[in-house]
Image: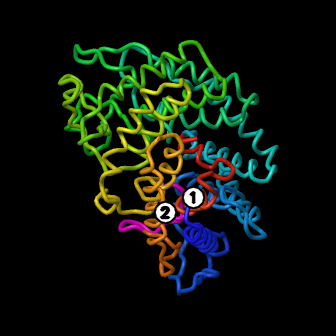
Amino acid sequence: MSTSRRLAAVDVVQHVLDRLTVTAFSTAGAPGAGAPVPDRSPDESLADLSLADGHPGISLAFSGTVPRRPGHAARAHDHLARATSILARGDEPAAGIYNGPGSMAYALLIAHRSTGGYRSALERLDDFQRNLVRTSLPEITDAPVASNGQFEVVRGLSGIGRYLLARGETCAPELRLLLGHLVELAHGRVMLRGRPVPRWWTAVPALPDLESALPDGHLNLGLSHGIAGPLALLSLAWRDGVVVEGHREAIEQLVGLFEEWTTEDGDGIRWPDYLGLTDWSAGYGRPTGRTKPPSWCYGAPGTSRAIQLAALALDRSDWHDLVHRSLLPLLTTPLDAWGTDTPWLCHGWGGLLHLFGLLKEHIDDPRPARVHEQLATAVLERFDTGTRFGFSSPHSNAPGFLTGAAGTALALDAYANGGRAHSGWDMALLVN
C-alpha cells in the first residue's frame, strides 16, 4: 500500500465526516470543507429509518471508521438519537436490516462494537429480531417464492441472519431456525409451467419494468437481492461453527448454480444478473439476463466474494479457481472501461474498492492487489470539496451508506486500515 495514498484516504475520510455531522446538516458551511458548500435543506431520505439512506446508515460513518479525533462516538450518537426518535413513532414495519427496526438494530450493533455501549437498547432490538424470526418465517411450498425479498440481504432473511450471527449465543436458537429455512430452500425444485426450477425462483420480475420480459418471474443471482446472499450467510455461519442439518449440501447446491450458469468471457467467466424461464429452459451457456457493470450488488466481484466465502468455509480449491476466473475479465480491462460512474458502495467504486481489498487476500495472483490500489486512486480522484458531502454521482448528491458519501468514506477508511472494516461495518454487505 502506498503511504501517500493511505494518508490521502485518511484526510478525505475526515473531510467527509465533518460534512456528515448532524450539526453540519443544518448549517450553510461544512467545517473543514475548504470550499463553499451549498445551503443544506432537510433531506427527505433522512425521515426514513433506513440503513441505506437514513440516520442509521450515516451513523456507521462514525461507528465504523477508526476514531482519529475526539467526539467521534458522540457524532455517531447524534445520528442514532435522531433514528431513535423516528423509531419511537412506531410506524416503521419490519423489513430486513436495511429498513425499519432492523436498520436501527444493525446501527446499534456497530456502535456497540465500537464503544461497548448501547447494551440495553441492543438487547431490546435483539428481542424484536428473535421474535420476528420465530413468528414470521414464510411457509415453504411447492411453488416459487412470492418475492426474493423473503431471503435476500437487503430486505430479507440473509441480512437478518447476519445480524443474529453477529450477536452470538444471544440469538443462536433463532439463527438456527433461519439457517434451517434457507437450507430447505436450497434443496429440491418446484415446478413452473412444467419445468423444474430451484426453490429460490421468485414469482415477480427482477425490476417492475421487466414484467413483460419476465412474465414467469426470475432466479436472481446477485448478492444484494439474490441467491448469493444466502450463500454468503450459510458460509459465514459454517466458518463460525453454527451448522444445521443439510448445511454443507445447501452450500454445494448454491455454488453449483453459479458453476452451471457461468458464461465464458475471454479467459474468464461472468454471471448474468438473473435468469428468466426462457433462459432456464434454454440451458447452460445461453443466459440472456441483463449484466450490469461490476459491483457489490450483481456479478463480479460481489458474487465472487460470496463464492470465496464458501470456498474458505468448505476448503474447496476448485471454488477458489472459480472466483479467480470470475475476476479475470476485470483484471484484463482498464478501470475506465468498467462502466462504473458513481463512488458509492452499491454499484460504485467504493464497493469495488472494498471487495478487491477482501478478495486479494485469498488469490494467488498479484493483479487483484494492483487493481485494489488503482481503485483507491479512482475513489480519491472523485472527492470534490465543492459538493455537499464530498462525493457525488451523476444522479445524486447523498449522505447515505449504500448510495452516499458515508459508505464511500467507510470504504476509504477500511483501505487506510489495511483492508479491515473497523467494528465490522461490512457485515451488512454479507462480505465478512
User: Is 402 covered by the magenta stretch?
Assistant: yes
Label 2–label 1 contact, CB within 8 A: yes
Locate residue 213 relative to residue 293 in the image: left or right: left
For the point 40% across and 67% down, the residue is 393
Which of the pair 247/43 is nearer the observer? 247
Q: Is residue 358 above or below residue 181?
A: below
Look at the image and tell me in which quarter the C terminus lies.
top right
Q: Nearer the viewer, residue 336 or 169?
A: 336
**Label at residue 189:** none
Give the amino acid type for the residue marked by disc 2 in the picture: Ala
Magenta span of residues: 393-406
- Tag on residue 415? 1
Q: Secondary structure at mark 1?
A: helix
Q: Secondary structure at mark 2?
A: helix
Q: Give the x, y percent position of residue 51.
A: 57, 51
The correct choice, above or below, for 282 with respect to 291 in the image is above
Q: Check disc 1 and give the amino acid type.
A: Tyr
Decide if residue 430 is in sight here. yes
Label 2, on which residue? Answer: 376
Confirm whether the magenta stretch covers residue 20: no
